[in-house]
Amino acid sequence: MQKLISLAWVFALLSILAVGGGTAVLPEMQRMTVTQFHWVTEKQFRDIYSLGQVAPGPNMLMVMVIGYRVAGYLGSMVVALAFFVPDCILTLFANRMWLRYSESPWRLSIQRAMAPIAIGLMLSGTYSIARLSIHNFMSFAIAAGTLGVLMWRRINPLLLISVGGLAYLIFSNLTGAQ
Amino acid sequence: MSDAGATIEAGPAARRRPQLGELFQVFLIAGAISFGGGVLAYLREYLVRNHGWISDDEFLDALEVSETLPGLNSVNMSVIVGDRMRGAIGAAVAVIGLMLPGMIVMMTLGVLWEQQRHNSNINHFLVGIAASAVGLLLTVTLQLGHKQFVRPLDLSIIAVTFLAVSVFKISLLWVLLVLGPAAVLLYQPRGAVETAERFTHLRERFHSHRSHWRH
């Protein structure tokens, strides 16, 4: 029971702090679930994040797997409700208020102020995943290759990350790297 | 190709409100086939162009608000658009539709992963995916922030935010409580509001999203 309550408040808090979307809250999510509560190890956090990449819909549905590890199916449901319900209610009412003040010059100020903070937080989230996954030349090459290919032309990201996964699988089988 | 906004000129009164079932179906499909940035392009295609349930300006306005408010952008977007079309019930229907397919797939993958935790092939595959995701996240961040990265004030805010979270490991709550109001003060209203060009950057982004979706 105590675990379910902790899961609920941690993920509700994380969703409210997610200025800039799911990526922006990754460092805080890692800190709370790995360092503070020991629900998952760093490697498990990385693997669960990767699972989220290959499922359709929002990548952050991966939080359900963290809940599942901690407290089974009930844990995954608690996490899903905590992560999505308070945020949806907040968005519903904040948006209605936002519409009422749509002519206010402060609206543009807030948008301009939040944009660079969101970008900074997304960079931090990217850095967190990089620290967990880039350990050798091959993983670096996969990250750089993905960036290069996406800058060069539009390709279905699912296809691209699957190639990245296969490339590392083949590399580690050939060289014995972890 | 003409812009979607130009083809939908009818006022709110002239537009048909979608049935809840229709709304659910559109968001269910969006949730089932969306990987990466495709979901927004798909929703714009269906809600604005094919059905005309909302105008393009309303859609882009909702996108702007979704990105400013905390929470996942796609979820916020579904709430706002659902609310615009059918009120709070519409918002709930849209969000559930968007998430249901992903939830089922995610839990199936999670249970399989739990059983195969010691399978080194799966572990190596997942490391490669995470490494590849770094490239993907960096691309998305650079695309979203291409205007901010070249403006000195924005670039300073980006740098301070990144350093606070990633180097000094300050709790996100404190980072937002301090940097949020500080940034709003730096950007406090001065003179006339520029509205004419408001959605230009969002439209530009959509052209890239849409082509990405088609490939």
Image (cartoon, coloured by chain):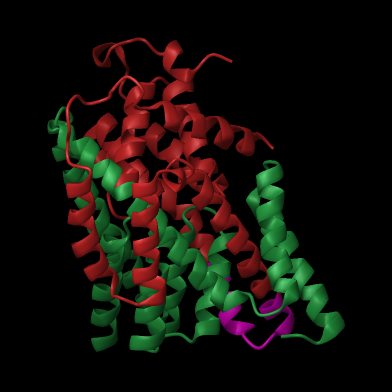
Numbered label tally:
0
In front here: A118 or B25?
A: A118
Residue for point 57% across, 68% down: A51
Is A77 displayed left or right of A159 in the figure?
Answer: left
Is A81 displayed left or right of B2 in the figure?
Answer: left
**Which chain is red in the picture?**
B
Residue for point 41% across, 54% down: A119
Q: Verify whether residue A27 appears in magenta.
A: no
Is B37 displayed left or right of A116 in the figure?
Answer: right
Picture quarter with the N terminus of chain B: top right
Q: Position of residue B205 (x, y in %)?
A: 50, 34
Can you say whether A101 is above or below B8 in the image? below
**Which chain is green in the picture?**
A
Residue for point 82% across, 74% down: A170
Residue interval drawn in magenta: B107-124
Can you say whether B94 is above or below B121 in the image? above
Residue for point 17% across, 48% down: B185
In front here: A139 or B89?
A: A139
In front here: B107 or A33?
A: A33
Q: Position of residue A121 (x, y in %)?
A: 39, 61
Q: Quadrant of residue A106?
A: top left
Task: Please indicate, yes or no, whether residue A73 appears anywhere in the rendered image.
Answer: no
Of helix, strand and loop, which mostly describes the magenta segment? helix
Q: Position of residue B179 (x, y in %)?
A: 24, 60
